[in-house]
Amino acid sequence: MITNIIVLFLSALIGGLMIFFFKNVDKGKFKMVLIFAGSFLFSITIIHILPELFAANMSGAQIGIFVLVGFFLQQILEYFSSGAEHGHIHVHDADHKHNGIAAAMVLISLCLHAFLEGTILAHPTDLHVHHDAKALLTGIALHKLPAAFALMSILTCYLSNKRTIVIYLIIFSMASPLGLILSDNLYESQYLSQEVFWILFAIVSGNFLHISTTIVFEGSPDHHFSARKLLVSIFGAGLAAIAEFLF
């Protein structure tokens, strides 16, 4: 679990700090990174999380309902997060206004999403009976890198104090590790039942489906065909499948 905690924390921290080194990011290249990460996450959700959910001691209809809850919960969160989960970058302009309340709302919504992400990596042996979680961890880390970068682009527009911005990033970086630690401890101490964990996993899978499909479809506005985007999507999904079955 220590490795998972470190990877979750550093992927968010490094992704966010990159804003200070790549201020004039190439949006085309950044979009390719997003599409790759989104396809990887989508593939892991389909081949890792959902099969385990539907093998649980719950009806398929119950699981489906909570997947839908997670899907629409993510849509609600995005009203407050400015779309940072799927890499919406904000750029400074001459007329931008600092807004501490808006910055706090973005941080809170992203931290809630990140906290839920961490819960799905709680790894009780009777919950993840078929696979290890290395491929899942990789998918989450790949998603967190551009998400943290996008968060910082938003915070630098809303806040003027660089120290405050970095503190916000550290808080965000801690959210997923805290979700992992808390959920694992609650399960091991039997404060939460196995059924509650299945519900959490279903909700998070709904989150992932919303984020990953939004990234992929936003990468093809008006459904214009792009061989490059298609190849990147297939590569991301294929690499996730290989990682899942190898690890």
Image (spheres, rainbow, N blue to C red):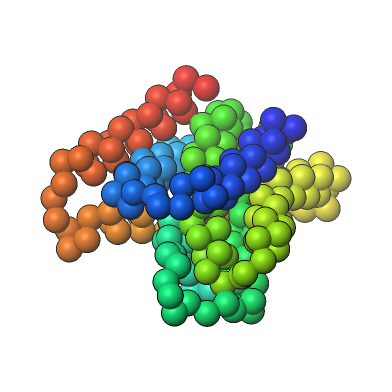
Q: Residue furthest front?
A: 94
Q: Residue at x 37, y 43 (%)?
A: 33
Work out whether 80 lies above or below 208. Answer: below
Work out whether 194 lies above or below 81. Answer: above
Q: Residue furthest top?
A: 246
Q: Residue at x 40, y 25 (%)?
A: 242
From the viewer's side, name the closer residue of 109 and 121.
109
Across and down, in percent, residue 99 comes to 59, 79
Work out whether 104 lies above or below 121. Answer: below
Q: Residue furthest left?
A: 225
Across and down, in percent, residue 247 comes to 52, 22
Horizontally, is 98 left or right of 213 in the view? right
Q: Can residue 204 be seen from the camera position used here?
A: yes
Across and down, in percent, residue 50 comes to 47, 45
Using the rendered view, name the quadrant where residue 215 is placed: bottom left
Q: Can residue 194 be seen from the camera position used here?
A: no
From the viewer's side, name the closer residue of 228 and 95.
95
Q: Residue at x 42, y 71 (%)?
A: 93
Q: Residue at x 43, y 56 (%)?
A: 87
Q: Residue furthest right?
A: 189
User: Which quadrant, please, contains the N terminus?
Assistant: top right
Horizontally, is 33 left or right of 158 in the view? left
From the viewer's side, name the closer residue of 86 and 103.
103
